[in-house]
Image: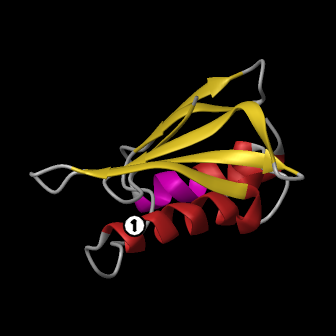
Amino acid sequence: MSNRQEAIIRRFKATDPAAKVQWDHKREAPALVTGRLSEQVAGAGLDNLVQAAREFLVENRALFGIDGTEKDLSLIAKHQDQAGNTSVAMQQLHQGVPIHGATARSVRGRPQCQPS
């Protein structure tokens, strides 16, 4: 784990002491991050949550091993159930081509991000 990744995890834990990170040593990135990792998303619309997930991943790209910008993240799924729970799935791209295994899922706006 790099110093930059450790700093991001410390920031998450400062925001939410209950935040947890399960580390994938093979990928040198988190397998699962849980907790209240960001501020409340303004507006409850699903499109606002999709944008918030994109911004979160770009802002924390050093932690997740994302080499690129927002344009390198493609929305592959979004869903909001009747209870108001939301999920967003993003795929990392390289020169427009999906990278195998480089997906992230965000649940309820941004509180949980799970690369898969």
Percent coordinates x, y for residue 62 in the rendering: 77, 52
| 11 falls in the magenta region | yes
Q: Residue at x 29, y 80 (%)?
A: 43
- Magenta segment: 10-15
Amino acid under label 1? Leu
Q: Dividing the picture into quarters, in which one does residue 108 lie?
A: bottom left
Q: Residue at x 83, y 59 (%)?
A: 68
Residue 83 vs residue 61: left or right?
Answer: left
Q: Residue furthest right?
A: 95
**Colouring chosen for the image of the structure:** secondary structure
Percent coordinates x, y for residue 49 in the rendering: 39, 66
Residue 70 vs residue 17: left or right?
Answer: right
Q: Dividing the picture into quarters, in which one does residue 44 lie?
A: bottom left
Residue identifier under label 1: 49
| 95 falls in the magenta region | no
Percent coordinates x, y for residue 109 in the rendering: 36, 60
116 in relation to 35, above or below: above
Which one is nearer the viewer's eye here, 16 or 45?
A: 45
38 in relation to 64, above or below: below
Q: Residue furthest top?
A: 26
Percent coordinates x, y for residue 17 in the rendering: 39, 49
